[in-house]
Image (cartoon, rainbow, N blue to C red):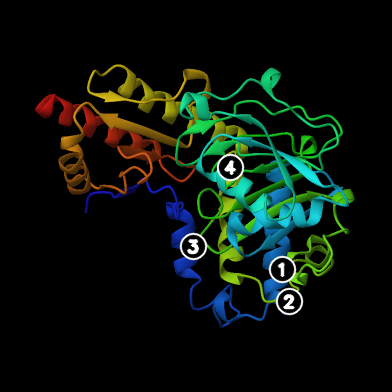
Amino acid sequence: MSPIYNFSAGPACLPDAVLKQAQEEMTDWQGAGISVMEMSHRGKDFISIAAQAEADLRELMAIPENYKVLFLQGGASAQFANVPINLLRGKKGADYIYTGQWSKKAIAEGKRLCDVNVAASAEASNFSVLPAQSEWNLNSDAAYVHYTPNETIGGLEFHWTPETGDVPLVADMSSTILSRQIDVSKFGVIYAGAQKNIGPAGLTVVIIRDDLIGETVSGMPAMCDYKIMADNDSMYNTPPTYGWYLAGLVFAWLKKNGGLAAMAEINARKAKKLYAAIDDSGFYANPIDLNCRSLMNIPFTLADAELDAAFLSGAKEAGLMTLKGHRSVGGMRASIYNAMPEAGVDALISFMADFEKRNG
């Protein structure tokens, strides 16, 4: 059978080795006689799985000791609310950087709880160019500065980390976490839905500096309190145990394959190839400024939108799945996260060249 390559933006493809290990352990985890899905989250077996997953993530990202790592539920969307709930700490407002659909949603949720200052926006360029930090209107009294390092839908990525002084920097890293090395110490909070570079949907990772825990907005539910979650090792309630286990397998796979330095090199090479195929063609186009292009989510359009359906149909027949662009922007989108093998990108490029030859 010919290989199938899944270019979905999320839930995204997982490493074959991880899926095979999970298959082998599905009904009997390492001689326990039961599946991880059947384990008590408070039993010694699952606690060992959880502890190893956290240790491996800390090693991969070089997370400092003064940061808590939480494995939660609710996706990144829940953190749109949890961030102001936990970080306002008596202040009235926060700064947000508006660069696309996901930062827009974070801003909307932030407005429910605080005064939002949109300190910079990419709207004037139709979200094709990031605003330079020299243009940002930051408030020195803001509770935090929130940004989205990679806009999954639009394909706009920061290749630099903003400087915010003493104001905590908060990042929604759902579609860029683990794709390359970052300096965690520059952030107050990092959060990410798992369903792109970590594991299956249902798990959310939150990395938060210790001094930002412990003072929530009054009257908020316990499930929104990072301190309660940290004090209970992310097990205040029953966590998404199987998702946590699979994330642990992904972390181990990353370590085995050279860690984030190796992933960064591979990801850069995959993206360079695909962007070159787009740019060298008069048939395909990418709207994003060269300095702001995402390495994870690559949108592109065809010269004639009437050919979109034929492109998608032909791609599916060739084993290239889920290439349709988000409904808000149209066209195509290839998401090439860590688990997408380079062979998948090569297959897409080959199909694109053939399709252009036949239809250009």
Q: Are marks 3 and 1 in contact (CB under 8 Å)?
A: no
Tell me the kind of residue under disc 2: Lys
Tell me the kind of residue under disc 4: Ser
**Residue 152 falls left or right of residue 351:** right
Q: Residue 254 placed where, x, y %?
A: 58, 46
Please name which of the two marks, 3 or 4, marks the residue nearer to the observer.
4
Name the residue located 54 percent from the left edge and 45 percent from the top edge. Answer: 102
Q: CA distance from mark 3 to mark 2?
A: 21 Å
Residue to which mark 2 is pinned: 44
Q: Residue 111 placed where, x, y %?
A: 67, 50
Please name which of the two marks, 2 or 4, marks the residue nearer to the observer.
4
Residue to which mark 4 is pinned: 103
Residue to which mark 3 is pinned: 21
Q: CA distance from mark 3 to mark 4?
A: 36 Å
Q: Earlier in the sequence, mark 3 or mark 1?
A: 3
Rendered view: 124 above or below 166: above
Tell me the kind of residue under disc 3: Gln
Name the residue located 88 percent from the left edge and 58 percent from the top edge. Answer: 215
Q: Are marks 4 and 1 in contact (CB under 8 Å)?
A: no
Name the residue located 62 percent from the left edge and 80 percent from the top edge. Answer: 39
Rendered view: 226 above or below 32: above
Q: Residues within 10 Å of mark 3 (few under 14, many from 20)?
A: few
Q: CA distance from mark 4 to mark 1?
A: 36 Å
Please identify the quadrant where the N terminus is shown: bottom left
Q: CA distance from mark 2 to mark 4?
A: 39 Å
